[in-house]
Amino acid sequence: MLGLVSAKTTPNATPLHNSFRQNDNHIHKNGNKTPSPLLKRTPSPSFSKPKTKPSKKTLQELRIDESSLDNPDLGPFLLKLAIDTMASGDNQNKALDYATRASISFEISSGPGLDLAMSLQVEAAIYCSSIEVLDHKSGSDHAMAKFSGFMQLGDTYSMLGRVDRSISSYESGLKIQIETLGDLDPRVAESCRYLAEAYVQAMQFDEAEKLCQKSLEIHREQNAPASIEEAGDRRLMALIYEAKGEYECALEELVLASMVMIAAGQENEVAAIDVSIGNIYVFLCRFDEAIFSYQKALTVFKSTRGDEYSPVASVYNRLAEVYYKTGKLRESKSYCENALRIFSKPVTGIATEEIASGLAEISAIYEALNEHGEALKLLYMAMKLLKDTPGQRSMIAGIEAQMGLMFYKVGKYGEARSSFENAVAKLRASGDAKSVFFGILLNQLGLASVQLYRIHEAVELFEEAREILEQECGSCHSDTLGVYSNLAATYDALGRVEDAAVILEYILKLREEKLGTANPEVADEKKRLAVLLKEAGRARIRKGNSLVNLLDSSS
């Protein structure tokens, strides 16, 4: 059977276990999304409640009597029913009934809190579903109401983890706002940036870049030079460039944003940008400059907020990573311990998502130090902090993927497969099943399945991963080629020798064009292909290459 390979990212790209790491640009401060940039005009007209038609209650509904709404277990149950019914789109009246009773139950049993806020948000989203009946061309009030409804609906879908529906709602709202206010209104810039942030969360970076560029153009047109709004756009643009691997462009945007913040006297914001600049220096292997940027930020954070401030722990994590990369393992572990001390006893006000993300980052460093037991312990701690709510499923999926990788490395393939399966299921439920990360995760699940001799299952996973990565990365990307190679190996294991040979011929052709015929990787692929062609009983089908392609390994 042909050998298997893990899908590898391009050099310096974010590894799989860090793909959900929180970014230091603090676009969403404390893990919370900024409010929707609603039209700054008169309040939206209120919508009357849709009348619920009387219906025959099922036995389950009869048990949920109004007199039992003070039961603390009833609110979560009703909220789950409301979310599931709303997501299915079957009966919005029933979903509204569940959400309303959940709100009453939470108010009676636990009072104000996250659960009550979530149930009210779901209730509001169901009311917002009536916005389709409005004609935004009938006047500014209609347009404002419809825009506000779409943005509210998008926020609710985002909270429920439905990123795809959230983006669709935001797009509808932005279209109405542009038709009403024009292309260059500052409020349109706010909405463009807001939608760009949603695209970043969905890892659709090309779309995010277009919208962020539009927001930047509007702010430069409407505001004074070097405005705070422009600096915010540049920080978001830097994050997008970083995700796309365009590190020099990201560094340029961050330096410009830092100059604006220095002029505005925003000391903490300058420190946050310094952390981001340090991250870019790490990607560029300019480690001394990265350490200098991190230390500058650390000094500011300590002087303004104290030693127990969560950004201090985050900078400790960054320094630990740099010192690990430069071979200074004792210093790396020391910074890990400093960060862990802060996250283990967090001060009031630190979001649980931020703590969980920090623990996952420390875990990744312990894993690199071959302390797998400690790394897994930290990931379990992070998992316990996060509730399995729709809004946190993507982060939980990232942690489970990280755990799966560790299990795979130590040969615990059953546990690895279980962790990968859980992560895949959560991302599917969140509407994130078309991203590069999801494609790589499917490849890893396929590899675990192969180790457990589930070859047919592995083939299906590799085929799905191939479709996603071809769409998102292209057929020549290293991640896609890794999946091709795995697919060829599984085809060979199932006796589909001809199918395997066709894939390997394609891989070999690409490697010859890029690396040259004398490259060791090309030689290995030739040997693999020769074995398959011998089994298939045919010679290699190839087109003639020019002498330039055959000899120039740098093309």
Image (cartoon, rainbow, N blue to C red):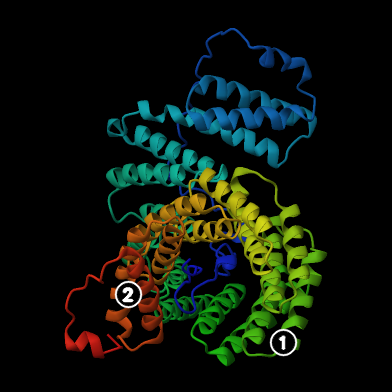
Please state which amino acid type lies under the numbered disc 1.
Leu
- Which residue is painted at 79% across and 30% down in the image? 72
The residue identified by callout 1 is 329
Q: Earlier along the polypeptide chain: callout 2 or callout 1?
A: 1
- Which residue is painted at 38% across and 56% down in the image? 496
- Which residue is painted at 41% across and 70% down in the image? 244
Q: Is residue 476 visible?
A: no
| Left or right of 154 in this view: 529 | left
Q: Foreground: 31 or 234?
A: 31
| Left or right of 19 in this view: 296 | right
Rendered view: 97 above or below 142 = above
Q: Foreground: 322 or 35?
A: 322
Give the quadrant of the C terminus.
bottom left
The residue identified by callout 2 is 508
Rendered view: 341 above or below 416 = below
Q: Quadrant of residue 463?
A: bottom left
* Disc 2, SS: helix
| Left or right of 471 in this view: 31 | right
Rendered view: 493 above or below 90 = below
Q: Are marks 2 and 1 in contact (CB under 8 Å)?
A: no
As measured in the structure, the alpha-carbon distance from the residue carrying label 2 to the one carrying label 1 is 40 Å
Please state which amino acid type lies under the numbered disc 2.
Leu
